[in-house]
């Protein structure tokens, strides 16, 4: 919940993704139109499973498509933690968004006590099991213990989790969890890490650009 329309316009005007890197911007709902003014690829931060109805505070896939939005994040750890998102509601949102024609970044990841208890693989298997294989689906692995904590999965931990996810579902997998310019290249250099879902480090245009450069094939 950062950057209203004015700040979003300024960010988008200053941001130029490096050649060969697909960069997606995911501003709040009120700033989607502003982000779209600059010809960037824009995703929403959430999408509902119904086309319309008595769902106050939600936004539907047809509404996003009419605006010109390309896709949506679904099941982000903060949605699960603070707003009661479950594997079932994630499934409903993902399936409907894909059917409507949106692209989707579906988030999965374990809590700290689940990793410490040796349950991480089981959690990932459960969360991934509800997702369909689809050409417009990307999965983001975000270990919840590394979200906004300054902790980061080691490259080896990220690779292990990504390899597991890809063994369950043949889709690209992004890493999300305190990605910064300082660690982006090593994380994205892992064999099964296809990119990054960037949180706090994306708020500064220079920081986000540096992370995008780390993903550049050149």
Image (cartoon, grey):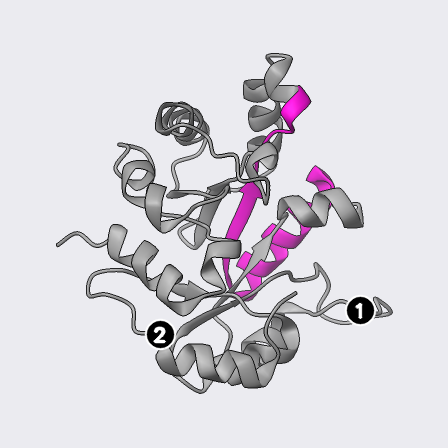
Q: Quadrant of the C terminus?
A: bottom left
Residue 192 % position (x, y) = 32, 33
Q: Which residue is mark 2?
A: 15
**Crowdedness of circle 2 by 10 Å Cα count: few (<14), some, many (20+)?**
some
Tell me the element at label 1: loop
Is residue 75 shown left or right of residue 209? right
In the rendered view of the protein, which quadrant contains the N terminus? bottom right
Upstream in the sequence, badge 1 or badge 2? 2
Q: Find residue 83 and report its horizontal and vertical position in percent.
A: 79, 50
Could you tell whether 172 is left or right of 123 in the image?
A: left
Inspect the magenta stretch and tell me whether residue 107 lies in it: yes
Magenta span contains residue 120: no
Task: Please tell me which residue is depicted at 50% across the width and 41% down the height of the picture.
Answer: 177
**Of residues 130 and 24, which is closer to you in this image?**
24
In the rendered view, would you say 161 is above or below 7? above
Q: Which mark is residue 57?
A: 1
Counting from the top left corner in percent of width and height, residue 133 is at 46, 42
Question: What distance separates the C-alpha of mark 1 from that of mark 2?
Answer: 30 Å
Q: Nearer the viewer, mark 1 or mark 2?
A: 2
| Mark 2 element type | loop
Q: Residue at x 36, y 23 (%)?
A: 156
- Report the front residue among 156 and 36: 156
The answer to whether residue 148 is above or below residue 97 is: above
In the image, is 195 to the left or to the right of 128? left
Residue segment shown in magenta: 86-113
**Would residue 119 be seen by someone viewing this image from the given angle?**
no
Q: Residue furthest left?
A: 218
The total of numbered circles placed on residues is 2
At a point 25% along the width and 37% down the height, the residue shown is: 189
Residue 119: image quadrant is top right
């Amino acid at each position: 919940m950062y950057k209203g329309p004015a700040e979003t316009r300024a960010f988008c005007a200053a941001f130029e993704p490096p050649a060969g890197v697909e960069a997606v911007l995911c501003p709040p709902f009120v700033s989607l139109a502003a982000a779209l003014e600059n010809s960037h690829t824009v995703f929403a931060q959430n999408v509902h499973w119904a086309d319309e109805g008595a769902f106050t505070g939600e936004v539907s896939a047809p509404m996003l498509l009419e605006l010109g939005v390309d896709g949506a994040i679904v099941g982000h750890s903060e949605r699960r933690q603070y707003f009661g998102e479950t594997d079932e509601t994630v499934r409903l949102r993902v399936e409907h968004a894909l059917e409507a024609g949106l692209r989707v970044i579906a988030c999965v990841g374990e809590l700290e006590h689940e990793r410490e208890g040796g349950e991480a693989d089981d959690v990932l298997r459960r969360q991934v099991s509800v997702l369909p294989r689809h050409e417009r689906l990307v999965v983001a692995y975000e270990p919840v213990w590394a979200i906004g904590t300054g902790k980061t999965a080691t490259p080896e931990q990220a690779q292990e989790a990504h390899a597991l996810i890809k063994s369950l579902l043949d889709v690209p997998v992004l890493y999300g969890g305190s990605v910064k310019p300082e660690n982006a290249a090593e994380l994205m250099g892992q064999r099964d890490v296809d990119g990054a879902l960037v949180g706090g480090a994306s708020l500064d245009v220079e920081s986000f650009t540096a992370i995008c450069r780390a993903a550049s094939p050149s």
